Image (cartoon, rainbow, N blue to C red):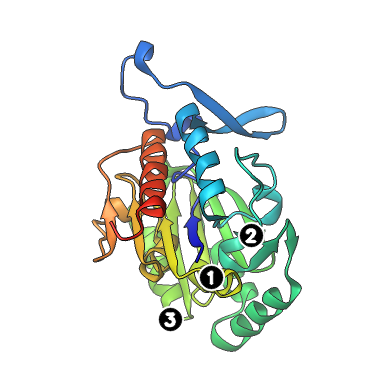
Amino acid sequence: MPVLVASDLDRTLIYSSAALALTMPDARAPRLLCVEVHEAKPLSYLTETAAGLLTDLGDAAVFVPTTTRTRKQYQRINLPGPPPAYAICANGGHLLVDGVTDTGWHARVQARLAAECASLAEVGEHLLRSADPVWLRKHRIAEDLFAYLVVERELLPEDWVKELAVWAEDRGWTVSLQGRKIYAVPKPLTKSAAVREVARRTGAELTLAAGDSLLDADLLLAADRGWRPAHGELADTGWTAPDVTALPERGVLAGERILREFLRAVRQPGG
């Protein structure tokens, strides 16, 4: 039976220059491969060693990129290795099969959101009304499924995100702070639901996962084994689970370590 490997991308496998966390002397820094260009500028990287590991993983398992990015943002990424047959975008709102949205899956997701939580219009309006222009830089609606703000972290009041999370909780939404972005996402919109669908379609009996943020917690809990880096929301809050390993590495070297762990588990599934 195939092994399914579902991994978050940003700050889990790929890293912006600000998130690389290269703390070693410059002469000992790893060689980096750029895997994303945006507006003619390099944006995201992994180590060359990680690129080789990801290629090996794509040959050995069903590798499924699992991201909160929109489809357009995901399609900017050029990962090494064979093109994934499945990818999950918009936090589970879109399941791509050979790069094309599965419309049946998307319709099922939309039906659940309409039935189980407050509308995107209500939440989006609240975000705009309560955010302060002093620290708000952008307000975005993603795929007509969820909303996020781009903020100046240094100016963001510490209690604002906590208050937003309480407000959202009562309406069936969750809030996640990732770098300079604050996400508001409906609770039924999950990466884990889409991953379970891919497991059903592929016949995978073992699922491995990795992620760094609150929006990855359900993915990690749904997997048979999971890993998280020493940075990000989950690490900052000390989040743990019985089958999830908290790694000591931070930054781009954590991405390399995660890929080593994936490959080891794929090659020795009982180990």
Residue 243: image x %, image y %? Answer: 28, 64
Three-letter amino acid code at the position of disc 1: Ala
**Number of marks:** 3
Q: Secondary structure at mark 2?
A: strand
- Per the image, label 3 sits on a secondary structure element best described as loop
Instruction: Identify the residue at image location x=66%, y=47%.
Output: 83
Pointer 3 or 2: first along the chain: 2
Name the residue that disc number 1 marks. 199
- How crowded pointer 3 is (Cα within 10 Å; few <14, some 14-19, many 20+) is rated as few
Q: Is residue 243 visible?
A: yes
Residue corresponding to mark 3: 170
Say which residue appears at 70% left-offset and 62% top-offset.
Answer: 97
Amino acid carrying label 2: it is Tyr
**Residue 250 in the image, given as x and y percentages of width and height:** 33, 38
Mark identifier at residue 55 = none
Say the numbered circle drawn on residue 86: 2
Q: Is residue 136 visible in the rendered structure shown here?
A: no
Residue at point 41% right, 59% down? 208
